[in-house]
Image (tube, rainbow, N blue to C red):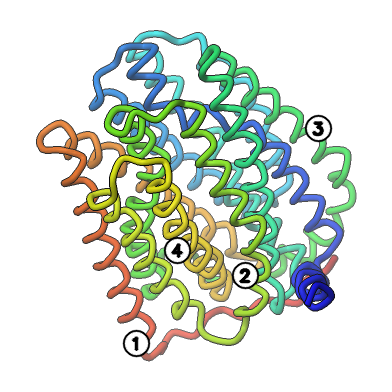
């Protein structure tokens, strides 16, 4: 039994390129310092004394910056390559996280949040293109899951440490987040020098494909992603505030929950993806994950305010995340080549950025005018609607063929 389990995990992680592992390490260092955004609504409300809607609006400015950052980052990635976009995003984001910690008024926090997010989120489309560049068509989903593993390993450390630091002094979060961004940039320079990419990036530039905005199926898919991600972002925006103000959890326990979310993904996602990859169309798994996630949020209206309740809710949301998100990446990658991958990645990142604006605004308004109960019902209903959309997309005849992946050069 033990030997078969070990072999299962070994198979799940085999066949990935060395540079995929290097990108994983860079992401791990970067995300180990991700502490500001998960605690931003609590920080704005508790430390800066903003109202709950104002705290939601600040998260909206993060989302607005993300949209522009993703679009700009994707455009530059298609024209110049993914390497220097990643480097700029990490360095500038590191400096701006530290600067944000010194802001105290609503206007200054909003402006700094927007600029920070614009610079920092340009990393995502470039990083997505880099991941695909170092993967093959057969392991592209696992390569993305490896990157998600790094993100969630960072959550394990960063979430729990963030909770402890927040209980001491919230300003420590900004310093740690900033320095880990800068450290990740230095690590990228060391492990994957720019000179090593010159030959392969020249070959990749020979591929030309239509931009994402001309792919009608993809645009419909992006609309559904926006609906789902608007719900999912409640996990990091309004759910922590709910746990603090309604169920009276400590910052430490809220951070612990975030760490457990990451731990579950680290332990099980790669194995699950390895067993599912290339067996069914990605949309088969996406709609099921969306339904499970919505159910997890609705449980907030039924379970008592006990520590075990949050764990049960977390299990459902995490399972939904594992099923939905890796295969969302697979879907858009299927429709790209090296000549248009930046535009597809940018639009996908933009979908999440739009949700980052909508999630706290919808959450803040629902809480202010009615209650948290309404917010969780709305979240469940949107997930149900999005799941039905993914089912419709799955049953549609794909008259527009995806652009095939090129042979990847390592």
- 360 to 273, vertically: above or below: above
Disc number placed over residue 208 in the picture, else none? 2
| Mark closer to the observer (3, 4) | 4
- 18 to 175, vertically: above or below: below
Q: Residues within 10 Å of mark 3 (few under 14, many from 20)?
A: some
- Closer to us: 282 or 311: 311
State which tag comes first along the sequence, 3 or 1. 3
Q: Decide if residue 333 is on the left or right side of residue 32.
A: left
Q: Residue at x 34, y 31 (%)?
A: 241
Q: Which residue is tagged 1?
A: 396
The quarter of the rendered structure image containing the C terminus is bottom right
- Closer to us: 315 or 275: 315
Q: Which residue is tagged 3?
A: 186
| Mark closer to the observer (4, 1) | 4
Secondary structure found at label 2: loop
Q: Are marks 4 and 2 in contact (CB under 8 Å)?
A: no
Q: Are marks 4 and 1 in contact (CB under 8 Å)?
A: no
Q: Decide if residue 236 is on the left or right side of residue 407.
A: left
State which tag comes first along the sequence, 4 or 2. 2
Q: Residue at x 42, y 47 (%)?
A: 308
Q: Which residue is tagged 4?
A: 320
| Mark closer to the observer (3, 2) | 3
Mark 1 → mark 2, Cα distance in angstroms: 27 Å
């Amino acid at each position: 039994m033990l030997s078969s389990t070990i072999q299962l995990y070994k198979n799940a992680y085999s066949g990935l390129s060395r540079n995929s592992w290097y990108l994983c390490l860079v992401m791990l260092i970067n995300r180990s310092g991700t502490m500001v955004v998960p605690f931003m609504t609590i920080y704005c409300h508790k430390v800066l004394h903003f109202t709950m809607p104002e705290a939601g609006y600040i998260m909206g400015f993060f989302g607005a910056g993300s949209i522009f950052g993703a679009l700009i980052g994707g455009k530059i990635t298609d024209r110049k390559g993914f390497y220097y976009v990643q480097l700029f995003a990490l360095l500038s984001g590191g400096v701006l996280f530290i600067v944000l910690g010194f802001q105290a008024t609503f206007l200054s926090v909003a402006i700094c949040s927007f600029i920070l997010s614009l610079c920092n989120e340009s990393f995502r489309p470039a990083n997505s293109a880099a991941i695909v560049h170092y993967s093959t068509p057969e392991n592209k989903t696992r390569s993305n899951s490896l990157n998600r593993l790094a993100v969630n390993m960072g959550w394990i450390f960063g979430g729990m440490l963030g909770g402890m630091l927040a209980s001491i002094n919230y300003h420590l979060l900004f310093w740690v987040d900033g320095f880990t961004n800068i450290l990740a940039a230095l690590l990228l320079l060391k492990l994957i020098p720019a000179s090593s990419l010159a030959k392969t990036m020249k070959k990749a530039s020979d591929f030309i494909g239509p931009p994402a905005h001309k792919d009608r199926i993809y645009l419909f898919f992006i609309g559904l992603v926006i609906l789902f991600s608007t719900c999912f972002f409640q996990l990091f925006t309004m759910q922590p505030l709910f746990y603090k103000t309604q169920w009276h959890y400590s910052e430490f326990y809220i951070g612990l929950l975030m760490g457990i979310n990451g731990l579950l993904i680290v332990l099980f996602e790669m194995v699950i993806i390895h067993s599912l990859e290339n067996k069914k169309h990605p949309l088969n798994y996406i709609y099921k994950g969306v339904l499970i996630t919505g159910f997890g949020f609705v449980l907030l209206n039924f379970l008592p305010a006990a520590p075990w309740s949050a764990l049960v809710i977390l299990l459902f949301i995490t399972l939904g995340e594992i099923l939905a998100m890796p295969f969302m990446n697979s879907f858009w990658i299927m429709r790209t080549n090296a000549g248009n991958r930046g535009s597809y990645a940018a639009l996908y990142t933009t979908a999440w950025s739009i949700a980052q604006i909508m999630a706290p605004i919808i959450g803040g308004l629902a809480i202010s005018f009615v209650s948290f109960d309404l917010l969780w019902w709305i979240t469940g209903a949107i997930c149900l609607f999005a799941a039905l959309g993914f089912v419709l997309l799955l049953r549609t005849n794909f008259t527009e063929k995806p652009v095939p992946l090129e042979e990847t050069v390592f």
